[in-house]
Amino acid sequence: MASARGEATVQTPAILTFIVADIAAFGLFFAFFMIGRGAQVALFDRSAALLNADVGMLNTLILVTSSWLVVLAVDGARRGDRRTVRTFLALAFVVGAGFAVTKVIEYGDKVSHGITLLTNDFFMFYFVLTGIHFLHFLIGMGVLAMLWFKAGQEAVDGPLFGWIESGGLYWHMVDLLWIVLFPMLYLLGRR
Amino acid sequence: MKRSARGTANLVWLSLSVATLCSWWMAEHHGAGVWTVLLVMLIAAAKARAVALHFMELKAAPLIWRLVFEGWVLLNTAMIAGLYWFTQARA
Amino acid sequence: MQATQAEPVHLRSTPLARAGAAGRNETSTVSPFRYWRFCAAMGPTFLAVFIVCWGLLGYNIPPLSAELTGEQMATHFRTHANEIRAGMVGSMTFAVLYMVWGLSITKVMETLETDGNNILSQLQLWGAGLTVVPVLVSSSFWLTGAYRPEALDPSILQMLYDMAWLLIDLAYAVTSMQMFALGALFLSDKRATPLVPKWVSWYSIWVGVMFIIEVLMPYFKGGLFARNGWLNFWIEFLIWFFFIAIVTLYIFKAISRLERERFAATAKN
């Protein structure tokens, strides 16, 4: 990957170790879900039909857009442009916050109808998978906020660049996971 | 990232958004059928790949990392699509 | 005597440097790294004893299902009482080694804390030390169940077993703290070639985050998230074992490197 100020390619960011381990773990959860589904297809499809695919799609758009904004922030950092970095990080955060809003509404709606992770196996997977993903999302939001602060204090193409790039990679992972998670949970049962 | 690369990022975002809308529309309005779902998973695979290759810049990274991510996308979407098809075929 | 340019930064302000400066005109035969390797070796030792005593003798690999009845639990304790006693005695005796291991990590971490701020190395040490507690205490519960199982009501035996697992699983945060502190410190290493590779830091942080899934354990008696589930037992414990192995390996390498650097520095003086 290209580094700051167009220097020769440096080592790939070590955070990829975390990211690869994490997506591998999620891949395993996806497999467990699909295997669990295989044993109770009707139940899973019936339950999935209770999910709001419109919200799910909105969430995908939110994360994809937020991811894109982070790409622009990293690009700005590469050019040493602090203002661009902070602007796009802030926008990514604000857009990303939409995901939290929809998630809270979604969960709240389910729980108010008496549906929790103990309701049945589908909802166990639904709450756990989206819950763990949401935890990752929250950590990512924290990272975006911290980077925004730091970018106000230090040069964005100095040592901070490595952190901006790593933070960006982590945020893309959050996006990547949802891209697979959404159709798997929400759309498989559509009739 | 040069101007053209930034343009690529914008284009990728646009494609991702359009692809998402397409998947949703298909699932909502075409509903019926195994083929719709399989197509949706294929689109998901393409989207995931785009995020990995372009947003995460793995296209420019050492091959091994690119392969790991491409492999993950392939494995997961194939697994989901495969197990889905298998359960539908038996239904 | 002025510190030469070649002297690694980490030696200037640590106890190491002060000891060196104090005895600079003598050739000290006592290595400042004495006992570091011994302590580091206690990691794999802990792991081996844990697996054999707690895991195999104690019938914890895998744990008994939470779906078993009180009668079934009672039968388990009554049939295997002596093995469980032996296993738990071993597990309790050697639990402290996890902290000893943690100290070797802290010593290496301290060499990087050149500005005197040792908060991360202390958090790591406490995390390692506090991890001893759930291992020690939960083992005492299994031991209690095996002490006079014939006299105890099945529901009590079941509760003892449940209690032990609830403690050992839900105490995860103290170990996560160890992992986060370790990871954060080694990530801040500014050397061209880090003392401990960054991927080890990221792996440690990842394991610490993965442990959070244990919060689901009390809600399930069966399946992935139960105490004997694929996730909350097999994956969580295996990634922890791997963490111990990997960190031990790289701590040994770091100690050797620190020794080499110190030798090179003092040879120049």
Image (cartoon, coloured by chain):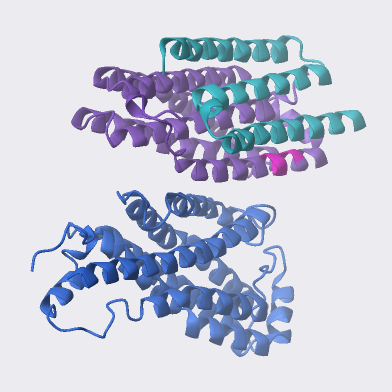
Chain colours: A purple, B cyan, C blue
**Horizontal placement of A115 versus C25: left or right?**
right
Instruction: Note whether B91 is above or below C93 in the view shown.
Output: above
Q: Nearer the viewer, residue C49 or A108?
A: C49
A31 part of magenta stretch: yes
**Horizontal placement of B1 versus A154: left or right?**
right
C205 part of magenta stretch: no
State the extent of the magenta-drawn residues as a range: A30-34
The reply to whether residue A112 is in sight is yes
Q: Residue at x 42, y 30 (%)?
A: A168
Instruction: Note whether A31 is above or below A71 in the view shown.
Output: below
The reply to whether residue C150 is in sight is no
Q: Nearer the viewer, residue C245 or A172?
A: C245
**Horizontal placement of C263 versus A98: left or right?**
left
Instruction: Note whether B61 is above or below C45 in the view shown.
Output: above
Q: Nearer the viewer, residue C136 or A115?
A: C136
Residue A18: horizontal and vertical position, in percent?
50, 45
Q: Residue at x 49, y 66 (%)?
A: C249
The number of discs equals: 0
Instruction: Note whether C130 is above or below B10 in the view shown.
Output: below
